[in-house]
């Protein structure tokens, strides 16, 4: 029997394919390995299943509309990048790296600052100002007070959404509030490292009762950018785009060259200085990788 479904999980060479309300454990056919094709979470696939059996083989992988590198998932409709306002403290450099990868895939994205009930120094106002100026929708949430949770509930309906962010920021806690039956494991903060403990061990597409899927990804603190083209980095900064044509030199790096539209926009306050500093760090990192 042939069925069409979605890969929702992959562990140890086995892929778990959801077909309507049933999950089949499948192996990928050898032809995929021969062609250097690896099935990923989110793929739409055809599977062949012997009659009256729950085990099958993936026989076809349909074209992907997009694919994220880390977490490796395909056919995503949107991303919600979650950072906490404290415990652990937000890292704008890491956030900008996430945004770069999402922009590369042209995904709609929301930035969520969680644990705002613990924001005793009102940090969130400055962060919200920076990223709204950059052109992003910013969500503020608290699982303690429920602030912002209904909004995320509405955003997830009938979409495939990737939840991304470092460990300990509360991704699993937010999802548990939205759908308590998920019972995702949550973790505290490492006293020694002052960052989150990993609780999600693998990438999994989780079906929601309200419709759609959510991907609760393993937390991590670094993102590989070595596949990004150096000349594209500035374009992936949304707020840079209106000023790119104002540079004197066509291949301006926006770092060393005179008469640069981006540097002028920073000086005039149209682009946040912190975002520009992160751009320089990311650009320099990718440039060094190219030299190696």
Image: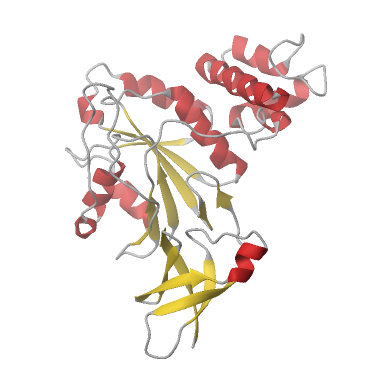
Nearest the viewer among 265 and 56 is: 56
Whether 132 is drawn above or below 105: the answer is above
Whether 174 is drawn above or below 128: the answer is below
Nearest the viewer among 20 and 59 is: 59
Counting from the top left corner in percent of width and height, residue 133 is at: 51, 26
Residue name at image x 28 percent, y 34 percent: 168
Counting from the top left corner in percent of width and height, residue 120 is at: 22, 19
Counting from the top left corner in percent of width and height, residue 219 is at: 37, 39
Q: Residue furthest bottom?
A: 51
Q: Residue furthest left?
A: 144
Whether 55 is drawn above or below 221: the answer is below
Residue name at image x 59 percent, y 70 percent: 30
Q: Is the image coloured rainbow, by chain, by secondary structure, or in one colour?
A: secondary structure
Counting from the top left corner in percent of width and height, residue 223 is at: 50, 34
Does residue 223 show up? Answer: yes
Quarter of the image for residue 281 reads top right
Residue name at image x 69 percent, y 33 percent: 232
Nearest the viewer among 53 and 187 is: 53
Does residue 130 show up? Answer: no
Q: Could you tell me how many numbered marks the image carries? A: 0
- Left or right: 192 as drawn, with respect to 1: left
Residue name at image x 61 percent, y 63 percent: 33
Quarter of the image for residue 101 reads top right
Which quarter of the rendering shows the C terminus?
Answer: top right
């Amino acid at each position: 029997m042939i069925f069409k479904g979605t890969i929702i999980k992959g562990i140890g060479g086995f892929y778990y394919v959801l077909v309507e309300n049933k999950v089949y454990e499948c192996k990928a056919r050898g032809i995929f390995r021969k062609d250097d094709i690896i099935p990923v979470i989110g793929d739409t696939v055809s599977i062949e299943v012997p009659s009256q059996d729950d085990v099958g083989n993936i026989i076809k992988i349909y074209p992907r509309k997009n694919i994220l590198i880390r977490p490796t998932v395909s056919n995503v409709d949107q991303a919600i990048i979650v950072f906490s306002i404290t415990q652990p403290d937000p890292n704008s450099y890491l956030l900008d790296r996430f945004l770069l990868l999402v922009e590369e895939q042209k995904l709609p994205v929301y930035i969520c600052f969680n644990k705002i009930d613990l924001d005793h120094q009102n940090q969130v106002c400055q962060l919200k100002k920076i990223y709204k100026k950059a052109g992003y929708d910013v969500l503020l949430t608290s699982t303690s007070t429920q602030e912002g949770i209904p909004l995320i509930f509405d955003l997830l309906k009938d979409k495939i959404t990737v939840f991304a962010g470092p460990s300990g920021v509360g991704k699993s806690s937010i999802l548990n509030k939205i759908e308590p039956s998920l019972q995702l494991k949550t973790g505290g903060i490492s006293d020694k490292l002052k960052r989150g403990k990993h609780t999600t061990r693998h990438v999994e597409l989780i079906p929601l009762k309200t419709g759609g899927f959510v991907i609760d990804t393993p937390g991590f603190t670094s993102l590989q950018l070595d596949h990004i083209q150096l000349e594209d980095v500035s374009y992936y900064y949304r707020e840079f785009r209106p000023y790119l044509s104002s540079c004197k030199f066509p291949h301006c790096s926006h770092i060393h060259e005179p008469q640069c539209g981006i540097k002028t926009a920073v000086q005039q306050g149209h682009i946040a200085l912190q975002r520009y500093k992160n751009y320089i760090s990311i650009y320099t990192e990718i440039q060094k990788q190219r030299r190696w």
